[in-house]
Amino acid sequence: MINFNRRQTLGLMGAAVASGLAAPAIAQNKKAVVGALRFTSHAGSFVAVERNYFADAGLDVELRFFQAAQPMAVAIASGDVDYAVTAVSGGLISLADKGAIKVIGGALSEEPGIDGQKILASDAAFQAGLTSPAGLDGKKFGISTAGSSFHYMGSRVAQAEGAEMSFTPLQKVGSIIGALKTGQIDAWSIVPHIAKPLAGSGTVHIIGNISDYLPNYQVTTVFTSADNADTERDQTAAFLAGFGQGVSDYNSAMIDKSGGEDGVNEMVALIHKYVYTDRPLEKAAPSIINGTMRINEGSRLNIASVQDQLTWFQSEGLVDAGITLDTFVDTSYVETFEA
């Protein structure tokens, strides 16, 4: 018999009801490959594996790790990976427009009052007066590629501040960090577990928070192939059930602190099996804790934020103007909301 706490039961019931099932989905020990990055924000999958939540839902899950989000999206489209979590990007929307993938839920979210993504300035720019986002006019902002979440965030901050910025594509996070440290770019935005250590080095400065500009930003989404969403409904609901239990445990320990310091330490030790594995636990723990952000319970999806992102991509000519939310979002699996 599987025992669920109240929060887990509600999340599981939500996934079941949304998918038209009368009871939690059981996928009959089907194999599923789940894509992930070695980030704290992917902890829902790590917890679900370690605490057998995927197995309890009937899935034999293999985690497959990637260095960036775009290759993970391509792997979903090709069928090499079944489920994954990533930010909305122009590339993701274009794959959906080709009928390859579907967003089926929400994951990481910006939430006022919880440390989220930081806006950073290089030391050179900071010393020259870039001490807040109000000074971004005329500055160079680092992004991985055009149409990335970095591009979206930077553009929306610039719009709010009435700033004209140039965007410098550098492909990889490591390259962006190097360019920021050496002053080749002036600004960037990134999750707190990367931003805070950079700021601690003295070569980079935190000058603002993304939540001040996008207070309910749906940072990442849960997605799968269009085929899985359409024809593998039991398996997909089972994935969301197991993932949702992992998310619930993570939020309970790291956001709500329901288990106190012991609960935080236990969760950090679990996450350390997948994140910052090249460091001893005592060195990795502060970075893991710094990466704590809310992950949506029951994979609830902020549809208003997703629509805002789609509208921005279209306004920039990065995706086809005829694409609608229905093109790349399947809202039948989880609760959606507008905030």
Image: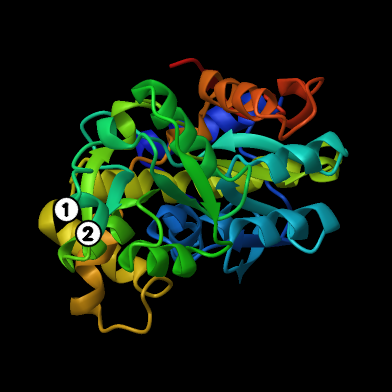
Residue 213 in the image: state x and y as whole percent: 35, 26
**Mark 1 neighbour density, 10 Å: few (under 14) some (14–19) many (20 or more):** few
Q: Position of residue 188 (x, y in %)?
A: 38, 50
For residue 133, what is the image quadrant?
A: top left
Say left or right for 139 vs 62: left
Q: Residue furthest left?
A: 261
Residue ID for mark 1: 127
Residue depicted at 20% across the width and 78% down the height: 283
- In the displayed structure, does residue 287 sit left or right of residue 138? left
Q: Secondary structure at mark 2?
A: helix
Residue at 29% x, 49% y is 120
Give the quadrant of the C terminus: top left
Q: Where 269 sits versus 246, above or below?
A: below
- Check the image and report above or below for 339 versus 214: above
Residue sitting nearer the eye, 211 or 62: 211
Q: Nearer the viewer, residue 297 or 69?
A: 69
Q: Secondary structure at mark 1?
A: helix
- Number of marks drawn: 2
Residue 27 appears at what percent x and percent y?
72, 50
Q: Are marks 1 and 2 in contact (CB under 8 Å)?
A: yes
Instruction: Look at mark 2 in the image and give the residue it sits on.
Output: 123
